[in-house]
Image (cartoon, helix red, strand yellow):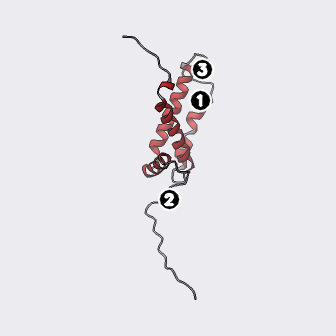
C-alpha cells in the first residue's frame, strides 16, 4: 500500500469542472441581476494573488502556487454561492446546453398592454 501521485491529466473531469466554474463566474459577473457589491468582492482574491504578501511564498515549489489556486477556487465558489439562485441556475443551464451569453430576464415582471391596429 503506497501513496501514488497522479496528474490532473488522468482526471479530466476536474479540469472540466474548474473551467465550467470559471465560465459560470464570468457570466455571473456580466449579469445585471447580480448585485455590484458581490462583484466587487471578487477583487479581494485577485489582490491576494498579485500581492507580495502570501501565506506560502511562491518561492516554495508547488506549495507556493497551490495556496493561490486554493484562494481562487474558494473565491469562485463563494461568489457563486452569493449570487441569486435563479440567475445561477439560468447560467448553469445555458452553459450545459452550449448557449451564448444572455442575461437572465427579470422574474415576475408582467407588461400589461393593449394592441391596437390603426386603419
Q: Residue at 55% across / 49% down in the picture?
A: 36
Q: Looking at the picture, how far across and down is residue 94, in whole percent?
A: 49, 50
Question: In terms of secondary structure, where does tag 2 sit?
Answer: loop
Q: Are marks 3 and 1 in contact (CB under 8 Å)?
A: no
Gap in angstroms between the C-alphas marked 2 and 1: 34 Å
Q: Mark 3 or mark 1: which comes first in sequence? A: 1
Please state, as top left, top right, bottom left or bottom right, where the C terminus lies in the image. bottom right
Viewer-proximal residue among 26 and 36: 26
The residue carrying pointer 3 sits among few (fewer than 14), some (14 to 19) or many (20 or more) residues within 10 Å by Cα, namely some
Q: Looking at the picture, how far across and down is residue 54, in whole percent?
A: 57, 23
Which labelled disc corresponds to residue 49?
Answer: 1
Viewer-proximal residue among 14 and 50: 14
Viewer-proximal residue among 77 and 53: 77
Q: Looking at the picture, how far across and down is residue 48, in whole percent?
A: 58, 30
| Circle 3 residue | 58
Mark count: 3
Q: Residue furthest top?
A: 1
The residue carrying pointer 2 sits among few (fewer than 14), some (14 to 19) or many (20 or more) residues within 10 Å by Cα, namely few
Question: In terms of secondary structure, where does tag 3 sit?
Answer: loop
| Circle 2 residue | 105
Gap in angstroms between the C-alphas marked 3 and 1: 10 Å
Amino acid at each position: 500500500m503506497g501513496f501514488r501521485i497522479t496528474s490532473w491529466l488522468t482526471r479530466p473531469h476536474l479540469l472540466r469542472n474548474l473551467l465550467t466554474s470559471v465560465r459560470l463566474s464570468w457570466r455571473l459577473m456580466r449579469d445585471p441581476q447580480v448585485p455590484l457589491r458581490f462583484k466587487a468582492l471578487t477583487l479581494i482574491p485577485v489582490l491576494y494573488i498579485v500581492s507580495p504578501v502570501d501565506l506560502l511564498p511562491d518561492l516554495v515549489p508547488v506549495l507556493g502556487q497551490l495556496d493561490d489556486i486554493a484562494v481562487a477556487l474558494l473565491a469562485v465558489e463563494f461568489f457563486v454561492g452569493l449570487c441569486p439562485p435563479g440567475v445561477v441556475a439560468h447560467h448553469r443551464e445555458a452553459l450545459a446546453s452550449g448557449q451564448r451569453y444572455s442575461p437572465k430576464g427579470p422574474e415576475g415582471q408582467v407588461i400589461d398592454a393593449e394592441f391596437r391596429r390603426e386603419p
